[in-house]
Amino acid sequence: MCQEYDGYARRTVELARDEALGLLASVPFGRIVFTSNALPAIRPVNHLVDSEGFVVVRTRLLSGLAALMRPGRSVVVAYEADEIDPVRRIGWSVVVTGLARTVTTPERVAEYGRTLQPWVEPRTAAVITIEPTIVSGLRLVA
Amino acid sequence: MCQEYDGYARRTVELARDEALGLLASVPFGRIVFTSNALPAIRPVNHLVDSEGFVVVRTRLLSGLAALMRPGRSVVVAYEADEIDPVRRIGWSVVVTGLARTVTTPERVAEYGRTLQPWVEPRTAAVITIEPTIVSGLRLVA
């Protein structure tokens, strides 16, 4: 019965690291942010968050990113997820920033192959982990 | 009654420019992507799309970006919005890439002050337009 916007501006509250990672782990997809041909680039992708807080993605949608990541090379990316109610104007957004690396160890590739199913074109998907070096998050509150 | 995931991988269909801009205009918020201290950065913000396809945002959440934009200077950003159903794994994502500029003309600042109300802390918000130089979009289909 209270699904209307109350007319007041929102304020933002910063989230602690653990709460932010917990929220990120509670949703199945987000958006990976990187630089492609000197331009900012962003693509939606589904993810999981492992026990160490690494964000793991696995999809061919990342081909633009994967092309930057030659074997042994890593690039800094940001990964964002949010849940925002546009009617009530409340919700949260979490951003993880850190090195993205391609997983090459066969055991770990196999493990993520079981636990993380890409939504799009599974067969050609690489597994990429993002190190949670910087974790920031905010909550929009009434 | 069909709100379940059917178990099949999705495929992506590219959207034409007009359709993509129409979808972007149909939702009230998205995420602005830029480079801050040499790191990829992303923040959620509410927007409108004007009659020429420019994305207009107005919020203090952009302070990180606004600091980059000294008077007369423009920076390239990406702006993303999406509507994705994580259960059925269908939806769309649109990305606009182009120059972001601070609006300084008093008439235009006043116009956007009326038509675009920032969700957070209105008084200190700058008006920023993003030129739709590159418009890309994809639809996730079953």
Image (cartoon, coloured by chain):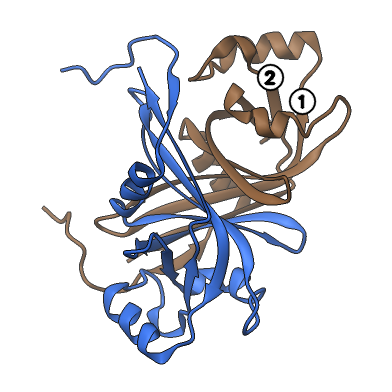
Chain colours: A blue, B brown
Query: Quadrant location of residue A93?
Result: top left
Q: CA distance from mark 1 to mark 2?
A: 7 Å
Quarter of the rendering occupied by the C terminus of chain B: bottom left
Point out residue B111 in the picture as x, y percentages from the top left corner: 67, 11
For label 1, the residue is B102
Please tell me which of labels 1 and 2 falls first in the chain.
1
Q: Secondary structure at mark 1?
A: strand
Is residue A55 among the parts visible in the rendering? yes
Instruction: Please give the chain letter of the residue carrying mark 1.
Output: B
Q: Residue at x 76, y 64 (%)?
A: A37
Q: Which sits in the foreground, B25 or B30?
A: B30
Q: Between B29 and B91, which is closer to the camera in this rendering?
A: B29
- Mark number displayed over residue B126: 2
Q: Are marks 1 and 2 in contact (CB under 8 Å)?
A: yes
Task: Report x, y in % for residue A49.
Answer: 35, 61
Residue A16 image offset from top left, x and y in percent: 40, 38
Give percent across and percent down for residue B30. 51, 38
Give the quarter of the image for residue B4. Answer: bottom left
The residue depicted at 40 percent of the width and 9 percent of the height is: A8
Horizontal placement of B48 versus A136: left or right? right
Are discs 1 and 2 both within one chain?
A: yes
Label 2: element kind: loop
**In the current view of this chain or complex, which residue is farthest to the bottom?**
A106
Taking the image as shown, residue B120 lies to the left or right of residue A41, namely: left
Q: Residues within 10 Å of mark 1 (few under 14, many from 20)?
A: many
